[in-house]
């Protein structure tokens, strides 16, 4: 072929690619953006791509949505001054980083469900606000072109916490340094009661190293952040390497975590009160996904996983009353699990977010776990059963059910058997002109039988805001939660407003109290606000009233949470683990 012919052909291909990208971009914007009048329904993630199943992926192109366009209304332009500042400070995610988070390949048949999984995986990254992978038919009926459309969040953020003015905590982080999918975080604590008064923590995380979908995280803390077992302020260093199961069509998943933690008497407690300890954690697991060769429409899978962990104390507290506590003794385990699962996702809005696309799971999983656990010098076989079922309705409501039970066997009897069941229901989105409201109700029941080694049931802050009754020992607990959230059209410098109100109730049977049956109530209301373009999560101001606490007195509690992040998409599988009930 002559050079002139090749040049003309390349020019034709370039024009065609630009045309495809622009066409797909216009279509993708309709999905990424919303409008004040939109009616939200659940939509199965793979439905948009079903008619392209089996067609060959000819090429993959990349487009991005800039800060100058609002995700709430594609016709609305963000103020030019704000856009200029954001673009000057923020570095867009580089195209090769988006490529490293793709598990779709050119010259391969298109799998609609796998494409939807990849779109959701991109959307779950903390530096991506939303994503769409648009399919455009190629020249022939047997091929398609893909256009990956992403919208970044403004990746710089701050943390503010602690108590003012005596113990102020400040932090600064960038979740996408250099547009390379890497996070750096620096937090400080200035506490007048500490010695020294200043402490800090550092965190570095890299997502999908060299396109392997494997993440690496390094951390150091002087302010008790990260994983800790004991009750004192801890210093720690740690490294974590993890690879999630990003899709039912992936083979491997696993993680390895190594940390070294030690308590430090920074509040100058007397020796009799300070718990001096040092421990290390070695925790690793690996799993293999069976069934990825099934037909495109068959999402049934079996996942086989193995895990080993060792929490080893180099130095234990001297106080006798703590030396028999589970958390201050060595523990180790060897666990295996097989999981049967089938899971799809539905796209919706206004669940935990303020207009961004959210992914709601629909399907089931059943897990059988067995192993050998050593705690408090008691070495015992362990087995557990866990089943989860979730259902999303196309009209916009969805619900989930969970049941788990596990225990140990020793001396010809079952010990520390836990029964735990729960359900959650979210109503469809009720719309009143430009206002939207969604309500939820949840219930959870737990029972501990033949207690021997493990911790008793407790009532904690996550069940009733401001109530921590962990000094009481319960063997039965019923928790109920009811909440309604009103999503308003009001906003202030991009922060959308959502007032909420709720009721919590916990009824528990205490084995150490004069009154065996205890019922606690919490009534709360508050305001949540969020700017979807910014990296940090929802801000929540909550006022709670507790008619009777663990001491029999009533009180009001004011709580503030920053970076409140709740995602319903979850993961397909997890590491084999002991049942968590507190």
Image (cartoon, grey):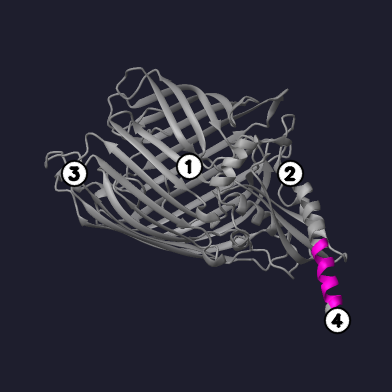
* Side of 569 where 451 appears, left or right: left
Instruction: Determine the main secondary structure of the stretch shown in magenta.
Output: helix
Camera-side mark, 2 or 1:
1
Please say whether residue 330 is visible from this viewpoint: no
Q: Determine crowd level at label 4: few under 14, some 14-19, many 20+ residues with C-alpha closer than 10 A.
A: few
Is residue 6 inside the magenta stretch?
Answer: yes
Where does the N terminus fall, quadrant-wise? bottom right
Compute the Cα span from label 4 to label 1: 55 Å
Label at residue 542: none
The magenta stretch is: 4-15
Nearest to the eye among marks 1 and 3: give it. 1
Front disc: 3 or 4:
4
Is 392 within the magenta?
A: no
Distance in Å between CA atoms under marks 2 and 1: 27 Å
Residue under circle 3?
Answer: 265
Residue shown at the point (66%, 37%) measured from the top left? 349
Q: Tell me the element at label 1.
A: strand
How crowded pointer 3 is (Cα within 10 Å; few <14, some 14-19, many 20+) is rated as some
Q: Position of residue 101 (x, y in %)?
A: 60, 60
Q: Secondary structure at mark 4?
A: loop
Depth check, mark 2 against mark 4: the one in front is 4
CA–CA distance between discs 1 and 3?
Answer: 31 Å
> Quick one: quadrant of the C terminus?
top left
Q: CA distance from mark 2 to mark 4?
A: 44 Å
């Amino acid at each position: 072929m002559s050079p002139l012919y090749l040049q003309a052909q390349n020019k034709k291909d370039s024009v065609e690619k630009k045309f495809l990208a622009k066409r797909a971009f216009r279509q993708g914007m309709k999905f990424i953006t919303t409008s004040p009048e939109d009616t939200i329904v659940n939509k199965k993630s793979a439905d948009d791509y079903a008619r392209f199943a089996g067609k060959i992926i000819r090429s993959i192109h990349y487009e991005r949505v800039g800060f100058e366009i609002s995700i709430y209304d594609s016709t609305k332009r963000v103020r030019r001054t704000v856009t200029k500042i954001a673009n000057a400070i923020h570095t867009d995610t580089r195209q090769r980083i988006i490529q490293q988070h793709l598990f779709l390949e050119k010259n391969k048949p298109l799998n609609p469900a796998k494409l939807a999984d990849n779109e959701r995986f991109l959307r779950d990254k903390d530096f991506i606000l939303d994503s769409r992978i648009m399919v455009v038919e190629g020249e022939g009926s047997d091929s398609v072109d893909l256009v990956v459309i992403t919208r970044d969040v403004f990746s710089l953020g701050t943390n503010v916490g602690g108590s003012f003015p005596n113990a102020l905590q400040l932090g600064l982080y960038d979740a996408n340094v250099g547009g390379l999918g890497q996070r750096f975080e620096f937090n400080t604590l200035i506490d007048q009661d500490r010695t020294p008064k200043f402490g800090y923590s550092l965190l570095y995380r890299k997502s999908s190293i060299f396109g392997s979908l494997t993440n690496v995280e390094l951390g150091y803390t002087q302010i008790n952040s990260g994983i800790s077992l004991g009750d004192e302020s801890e210093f720690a260093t740690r490294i974590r390497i993890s690879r999630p199961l990003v899709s039912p069509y992936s083979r491997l998943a696993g993680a390895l975590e190594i940390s070294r933690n030690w308590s430090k008497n920074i509040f100058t407690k007397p020796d009799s009160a300070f718990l001096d300890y040092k421990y290390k954690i070695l925790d690793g697991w690996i799993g293999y996904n069976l069934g990825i060769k099934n037909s495109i429409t068959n999402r049934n899978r079996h996942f086989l996983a193995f895990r080993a962990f060792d929490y080893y104390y180099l130095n234990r507290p001297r106080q006798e009353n703590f030396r028999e506590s589970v958390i201050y003794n060595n523990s180790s385990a060897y666990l295996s699990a097989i999981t049967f699962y089938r899971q799809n996702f539905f796209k919706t809005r206004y669940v935990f977010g303020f207009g961004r696309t959210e992914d709601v799971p629909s399907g089931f999983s059943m897990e059988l776990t067995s192993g050998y656990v050593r705690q408090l010098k008691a070495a015992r076989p362990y087995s557990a059963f866990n089943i989860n079922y979730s259902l999303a309705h196309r009209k916009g409501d969805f619900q989930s059910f969970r049941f788990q039970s596990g225990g140990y066997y020793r001396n010809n009897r079952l010990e520390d058997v836990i029964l735990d069941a729960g359900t959650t229901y979210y109503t469809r989105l009720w719309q009143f002109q430009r206002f939207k409201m969604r309500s939820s109700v949840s219930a959870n029941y737990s029972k501990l039988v033949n207690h021997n080694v493990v911790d008793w049931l407790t009532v904690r802050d996550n069940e009733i805001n401001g109530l921590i009754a962990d000094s009481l020992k319960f063997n039965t607990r019923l928790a109920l939660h009811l909440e309604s959230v009103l999503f308003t059209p009001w906003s202030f410098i991009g922060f959308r407003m959502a007032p909420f109100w709720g009721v919590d109730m916990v009824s528990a049977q205490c084995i150490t109290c004069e009154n065996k049956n205890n019922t606690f109530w919490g009534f709360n209301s508050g305001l949540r606000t969020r700017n979807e373009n910014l990296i940090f999560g929802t801000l929540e101001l909550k006022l709670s009233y507790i008619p009777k606490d663990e001491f029999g007195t009533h009180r009001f509690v004011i709580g503030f949470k920053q970076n409140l992040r709740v995602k319903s998409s979850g993961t397909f599988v997890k590491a084999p683990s002991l049942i968590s009930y507190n």
